[in-house]
Amino acid sequence: MIDKVIGRLEESREEAVERLKELLRFPSVSADPERKEDIAKTAAWLAAGMERAGLAAEVDATDGNPIVYGERLDHPGGATILIYGHYDVQPPDPLDEWESEPFEPVVKDGKIFGRGASDDKGQLLTHLLAVEAWIAEAGELPINVKFILEGEEEVSSVNLPAYLRANREKLSCDAVVVSDTGQFAPGMPAITYGLKGLTYHEIRVEGPSADLHSGSFGGTIANPVNVLSRMIAKMRDEDGRVLIPGFYDDVADLADWEKKEFASIPFDEEEYREMTGSPALFGEKGYTTIERRWARPTFDVNGIWGGYQGDGAKTIIPARAGAKVSMRLVPNQDPEKIGRLFNEFVKQIAPEGVRVEVIDMSGGKPLLVSTDTPWFEKASSAIEKAFGRRPFLIREGGSIPITQEFKEVLGVDTLLLGWGQNDDRIHSPNERFDLGDFHKGTLASAYLIGLLGG
């Protein structure tokens, strides 16, 4: 039967691209309150697509954007997968840097361009198309399949955790499948088995009640910008190691097999450096670039402000300064604990003469999925059949907080099977998705359904 399903998908490639274009035309920007109607239309389109495929579907209201749920339960009591995706997208700004209209998709050089092409509409659609092909050819699915598609991932999935808890029984499954990550490189498919966690904070430093003349008052009061700069400098040493006391206490070291797997991945450091545009690579000593990217915690200043920013000179002692900082965390590190240690360290190094405040903004736990399970092995086999080579096992430096919610609420692991590429320009102008990867991802999903079904 799998041959017929694959054949159907191969024959309907052009139709699949047209359906992807339809989905990409919805400007479903969750950060823009004026796009509420477009969000609702996108959800309705997806629900209709599920029903067309042969699933029972519903659009469930939340306190924010709706969640689209679908299911096909041909085997009561049998194994079940829950496929997750998000239909909301990032704002398209800056518009003048797009080479085509962000919500009028175009195909060029084998890639489809449009906001959401890779993140995440193109990737989630691969699974819906695979399910539709199975039902059309076999009349049923070899495994129970559920879908949950949300419209708030780009604004931190604020309502999804409550939805999971309220619908725990309805969403019960044996594994979650997520395609919202990427391959290692073109022609190098991958399964992501680890994600970093995150804790994000803002530091505010206040000194005088108003900006002061630096000649009249200089040398007599603390300058908030100077103070903030010294405080940030105390967060990391010259070798890239974070200096917050207790920061590394719970860090899990890489297993020997992980070090070997990372070392086996074709990786050109000079090519990587050129891609970033940086004059040199930098990071914690004693680790490779890949190990630092995927398996070591980090501390970064994401933004800093204070004082005069205009043209020319303005001699002042600024009244205030601030910085936004984030720490990417690895398995065993708890964001609440790290956030507490950070707050304590800021208080410890804050000098007299200024008022220092820390605002805790957001966080998420790291994720590490067991690679020693039948589910993981079958996912590897499915990708190998579709892409023509065994996937690399990789971690990612980014965070998908909802994966930890799936673990805690539903008690299951997540299979992160991404079809995107590093240069898909997600969150940037001219986002794109390679149509070869789009089609191969659809085939991989079809193979996965077949393998999981027995």
Image (cartoon, rainbow, N blue to C red):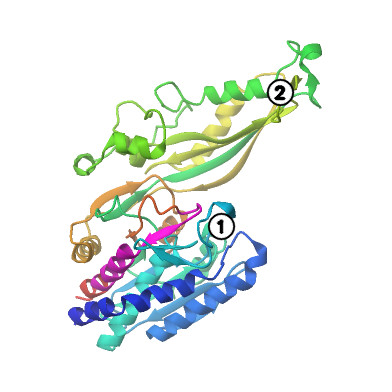
Q: Say whether marks 2 and 1 touch (CB < 8 Å).
A: no
Magenta range is: 426-447
Residue labelled with disc 2: 354
Left or right side of 376 for 89: right
Q: Which residue is mark 1?
A: 92
Which residue is at the front of the view, 320 or 89?
89
Does residue 211 lie above or below 153 as drawn? above
Callout 1: SS: loop
Marks 2 and 1 sit apart, C-alpha to C-alpha, by 40 Å
Residue reaching furthest to the bottom = 139
Residue 92, given in percent of the width and then of the height, sits at: 56, 57
SS for tag 2?
loop
Q: Identify the residue at horizontal 25%, vertical 87% (top origin).
A: 138
Residue 145 in view in this figure: no
In the rendered image, the quadrant that contains the N terminus is bottom left
Q: In this view of the protein, which residue sits in the foreground, 199 or 102?
A: 102
Query: Residue flagged by tag 1: what amino acid is it?
Result: Pro
Q: Amino acid at mark 2?
A: Val
Horizontal side of 41 relative to 7 (left or right) equals right
Hey, which quadrant is residue 247 in on the image? top left
Label 2: how many residues lie within 10 Å, few (<14), some (14-19) or many (20+)? many
Q: Earlier in the sequence, mark 2 or mark 1?
A: 1
In the figure, 200 relative to 415: above or below? above
Residue 306 shows in this picture: yes
- Describe residue 208's horizontal placement relative to residue 98 as left or right: right
Image coordinates for residue 323, horizontal then vertical, percent: 61, 34
In which quadrant is the C terminus drawn?
Answer: bottom left
